[in-house]
Image (cartoon, rainbow, N blue to C red):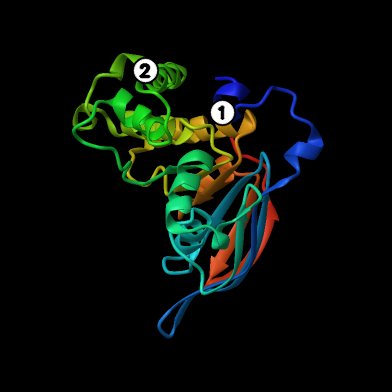
């Protein structure tokens, strides 16, 4: 897989470009009645970084991911992704922004059961206006790069867990997103398939893909991320640089 496949930019990206912030979260709050899911969170993720967010259930990490994805609106504070202030975009605009600039990988894949693998992937581009033939051609290229081109016409129910997650990764990469968000991407996989997905995420990041992981799995975080952010009670409680483990 090449840098062009992942980000649509040429290899040899400068250090200055890599250090630009893809995500800028400032004083982010999200309240549900009397409960504060996020209580003043600030975070930056630079271009080409891999950041893992960990914490106990209910700490706010999934809420933070949803805010960065534009799936939920904050009560206070701001979110900027790839230079865009998400708070200034209406719902229709947010949907289009997500399709074009954000790739998402979910724990339970979220594939469409009645579409074969290649069409699950191609649909992501067709929804942004890409012609079907062009979308299917890129989908096949991604399937080939991910080692499952021979499964292109297979429906999700007949794919293994690892294969379904690879299809989901290909779908997330379809529009060359500025940011790849992964919510417990190995949570529904056995250990072997989980290791394969970890290796894939590492490869993507090493090619320049900006990545944010939300996980309970410390091994996933330490293998795939270069920075670990910990959360509790809606706040960031710690942050440290990681040396990726083998």
What residue is disc 2 on?
A: 133
- Which is more foreground, mark 2 or mark 1? 2
**24 left or right, relative to 160:** right
The mark that comes first in sequence, 2 or 1, is 1
Residue 193: x percent and y percent?
Answer: 37, 32
**Crowding at label 2, few (<14), some or many (≥20) Cα neighbours within 10 Å?**
few
* Residue found farthest to the bottom: 34
Tag 2's secondary structure?
Answer: helix
Which label belongs to residue 6?
1
Task: Please say if 99 is above or below 133.
Answer: below
Front-most of residues 188 and 87: 87
Residue 121: quadrant of the picture: top left
Q: CA distance from mark 2 to mark 1?
A: 20 Å
Rendered location of residue 164, percent (x, y): 32, 32
- Residue at image point 42% right, 66% down: 57
Residue at point 42%, 19% (across, down) = 134
Residue 118 location, quadrant: top left
Q: Is residue 118 left or right of residue 84?
A: left
Q: Position of residue 79 (x, y in %)?
A: 60, 60
């Amino acid at each position: 897989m090449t840098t062009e496949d992942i980000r649509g930019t040429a290899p040899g990206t400068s250090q200055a470009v890599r250090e630009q912030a893809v995500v800028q979260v400032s004083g982010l709050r999200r309240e549900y009645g009397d409960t504060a899911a996020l209580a003043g969170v600030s975070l930056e993720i630079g271009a080409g970084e891999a950041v893992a967010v960990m914490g106990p259930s209910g700490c706010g990490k999934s809420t933070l991911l949803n805010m960065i994805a534009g799936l939920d609106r904050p009560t206070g504070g701001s979110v900027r992704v790839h230079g865009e202030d998400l708070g200034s975009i209406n719902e229709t605009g947010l949907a289009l922004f997500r399709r074009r600039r954000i790739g998402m990988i979910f724990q339970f894949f979220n594939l469409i059961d009645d579409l074969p693998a290649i069409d699950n992937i191609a649909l992501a581009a067709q929804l942004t206006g890409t012609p079907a033939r062009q979308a299917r051609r890129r989908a096949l290229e991604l399937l080939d790069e991910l080692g499952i081109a021979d499964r292109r016409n297979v429906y999700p129910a007949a794919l293994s867990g690892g294969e379904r997650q690879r299809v989901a990764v290909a779908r997330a990469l379809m529009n060359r997103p500025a940011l790849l968000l992964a919510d417990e991407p190995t949570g529904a996989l056995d250990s072997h398939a989980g290791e394969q997905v970890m290796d894939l995420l590492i490869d993507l990041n090493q090619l320049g893909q900006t990545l944010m992981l939300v996980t309970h799995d410390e091994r996933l975080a330490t293998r795939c991320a270069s920075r670990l952010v910990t959360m509790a009670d809606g706040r960031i409680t710690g942050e440290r640089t990681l040396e990726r483990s083998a």
